[in-house]
Image (spheres, helix red, strand yellow):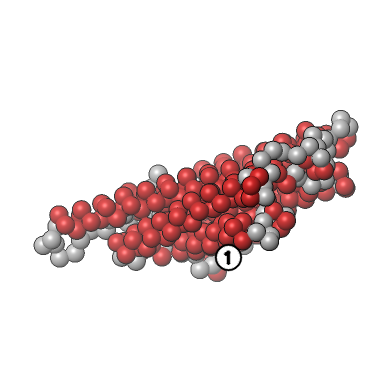
Amino acid sequence: MSSRWIRPGTAAILCVFCFLRLPQLFSTCVAFSLVADMGIWRGAIGNWSMSFWCVCFAMTLIISTVELYRRRSYFPFFWHNISVTFACYAALICLSASIIYSITHVQFLPHGPYRDRAIAATAFSCIASVLYVIEVTVIWAMYDLEETFFYVHTTRALLKVLETFVAVVMFALLCNFTLYLQEPALEWCVAVYSICFILAAVVLLLGLAEWEYMPPRPFSIFQLVLSLLSVLLYVSALVLWPLYQFSEELGGQPQRPSDGDCRDELTYDMCFWDQCLAVAVLTAINLLVYVADLGYWARQVSVGTENVSSAPNSVQSHPVTSQSEDIL
């Protein structure tokens, strides 16, 4: 399949900007402004959500500027892959911020103007998430999929997006260094999250650069080895993190405390026990994603071996994983 880039017309770009990008900019900006104006009532979770909305706003503005001024050729990666990848991440980010902010902070705010602001910010964040999902669909519709390959429109890319996104959420929870410092087993878990995130991010960037056009079998084996390594590392983290955080024999806390930031009322910081539990749950979720990734690449390598053995006299074997076969 040809990887030729079929550019959408100026009218299509303007329609996307007017009906999607402007509402996205407006929604993220309003959500950020409403929480920023709450002062000390916004809490640590509010600051965390604001940073996510700010990133979405800034990246949407940059992408819109590049497209409106026709500067897409300045980027080394195919532009359609960059824009749709960001839209996938932004949809997940805004949705996660809406859920986490409402569950951990908004429900504890007293009735009044600050609570109304927080609820409105959550609503605008949900609207932004829906708009980014619509953008993903529209971008795919703007290009001819018979001529243009979308890396993010493949199983392997969506798995990498999920792996890296879950890791980013865990890093946000791990900003509280007291959760794991001075305990080698917990520090190892954080190292596992970092190593696997870097590996997944590198593979995702290589895919966006369409580096997978190298011979398919070596690339599949390379991906299989990385997936197997990540699964083994995450298994160790899934065992060690709950063991050292919730086992009383190893210095953990099996029960949620009811004092300090863990009171069932409004507090500035998120309860440290809830953070530990959230990291444990996200570790299990990401392990499942990595297992799915491992199964995917094991199948690709297996199919490739069967194809090679069934055609020993062929001068040139056909690629194992073509782009069209991998597109969802």
Q: Residue at x 61, y 39 (%)?
A: 130
Badge 1 local density, few (<14 within 10 Å), some, or many (20+)?
Answer: few
Q: Is residue 43 left or right of residue 186?
A: right
Residue 182, picture quadrant: bottom right
Amino acid residing under circle 1: Arg
Task: List x then y, in percent, for residue 15.
Answer: 60, 46
Task: List x then y, in percent, for residue 308.
Answer: 19, 58
Q: Which residue is mark 1?
A: 71
Q: Residue at x 59, y 47 (%)?
A: 243
Q: Is residue 264 visible?
A: yes
Q: Is residue 98 visible?
A: no
Above or below, 82 against 214 in this view is: above
Q: Nearer the viewer, residue 257 or 176?
A: 257
Task: List x then y, in percent, for residue 291.
Answer: 43, 48
Looking at the rendering, in which quadrant would you find the C terminus? top left
Q: Nearer the viewer, residue 95 or 153?
A: 95
Above or below, 273 against 180 in this view is: above
Q: Is residue 189 left or right of residue 147?
A: right
Looking at the rendering, in which quadrant would you find the N terminus? bottom left
